[in-house]
């Protein structure tokens, strides 16, 4: 086995609300059980199917702000009147143990991550069209008409920021998009700057006396 001191890679997935980040990430994690998902904290109310500690840590605003003051978030942002943040400790632990992590966060948070962790890989997920996006949000029946319109306006703002990302994916067919995400992961994993090249050379030389 070649030794290379490889740290985990952080994959930051963003995209407009309703584009299907959860579906994509669920399928991706099923096929790639060695990748861990970063569970965010939020002050948003849970949706019907959501579980505390699995989809999100659902916190009161008071608790969220206390964590913020203690510097316990890698990044955080306000999105559609709710607070969202990524707890720092679990991410550090996983990356240092060589585990790849995927997180689903919006654009302001992604910018903060890239500023702090240059090695993070930013992937932007776009819908096939805005009409399709609206119908996906309507179909999940979790937002009011007013909230849907706010999220669509926000979608256009987010699309503009997409240009600072490293990769984009069009979410039309989940199966294909998962394969594309796997290709991104594969390519990023093979980057020489992510490993200790001297260690690779040393480990190749082991037991070889030329
Ligand atoms: P939702 O309320 O639909 O679950 O998420 C709304 C938005 O918040 C999505 O764009 C999602 O990517 C983003 N989000 C979820 N968790 C975090 C987080 O920890 N930090 C940031 N900055 N955004 C998050």
Image (cartoon, rainbow, N blue to C red):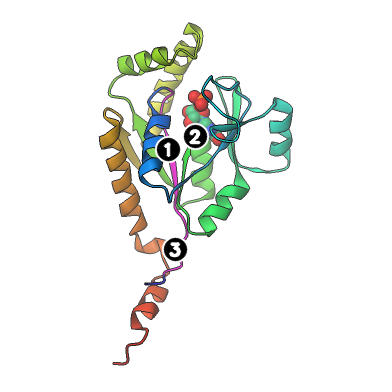
Q: Which mark is residue 13?
A: 1
Q: Which residue is mark 2?
A: 105
Instruction: Compute the Cα span from label 3 to label 2.
Output: 24 Å
Instruction: Compute the Cα span from label 2 to label 1.
Output: 6 Å
**Residue contact at pointers 1 and 3, CB within 8 angstroms:** no
The picture places residue 88, in percent across and down from the top left corner, at: 61, 46
**Residue contact at pointers 2 and 1, CB within 8 angstroms:** yes
Determine whether the beta carbon of the residue marked 2 sits less than 8 angstroms from the nearest atom of ligand 1.
Answer: yes
* CA neighbours of label 1 inside 10 A, class few (<14), some (14 to 19), many (20+): many
Q: Which residue is mark 3?
A: 6
Q: Earlier in the sequence, mark 2 or mark 1?
A: 1
Image side of residue 117 versus residue 200, left or right: right
Q: Quadrant of residue 210?
A: bottom left
Q: Quadrant of residue 78?
A: top right
Determine whether the beta carbon of the residue marked 1 sits less than 8 angstroms from the nearest atom of ligand 1.
Answer: yes
Q: Earlier in the sequence, mark 1 or mark 3?
A: 3
Residue in the image at 52% along x and 59% along y: 97
Image side of residue 129 versus residue 110, left or right: left
Magenta region: which residues? 4-17
The picture places residue 45, in percent across and down from the top left corner, at: 60, 21
The picture places residue 36, in percent across and down from the top left corner, at: 48, 46
Could you tell me which quadrant the N terminus lies in? Answer: bottom left
The picture places residue 72, in percent across and down from the top left corner, at: 67, 43
* Magenta-drawn stretch, dominant element (helix, strand or loop): loop
């Amino acid at each position: 086995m070649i030794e290379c001191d490889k740290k985990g890679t952080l994959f930051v997935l963003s995209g407009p609300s309703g584009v299907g980040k959860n579906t994509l990430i669920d399928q991706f994690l099923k096929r790639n059980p060695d990748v861990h998902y970063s569970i965010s904290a939020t002050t948003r109310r849970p949706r019907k199917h959501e579980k505390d500690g699995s989809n999100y840590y659902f916190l009161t605003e008071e608790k969220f702000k206390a964590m913020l003051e203690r510097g316990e978030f890698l990044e955080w942002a306000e999105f559609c009147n709710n607070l969202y943040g990524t707890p720092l400790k679990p991410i550090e632990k996983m990356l240092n143990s060589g585990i790849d992590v995927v997180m689903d966060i919006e654009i302001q948070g992604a910018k903060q991550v890239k500023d702090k962790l240059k090695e993070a890989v930013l992937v932007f997920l776009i819908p096939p069209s805005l009409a399709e996006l609206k119908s996906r949000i309507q179909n999940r029946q979790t937002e009011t008409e007013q909230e849907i319109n706010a999220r669509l306006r926000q979608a256009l703002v987010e699309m503009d920021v997409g240009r600072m990302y490293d990769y984009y994916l069009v979410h039309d067919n989940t199966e294909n998009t998962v394969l594309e995400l796997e290709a991104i992961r594969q390519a990023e994993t093979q980057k020489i700057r992510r490993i200790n090249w001297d260690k690779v050379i040393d480990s190749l030389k082991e037991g070889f006396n030329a």
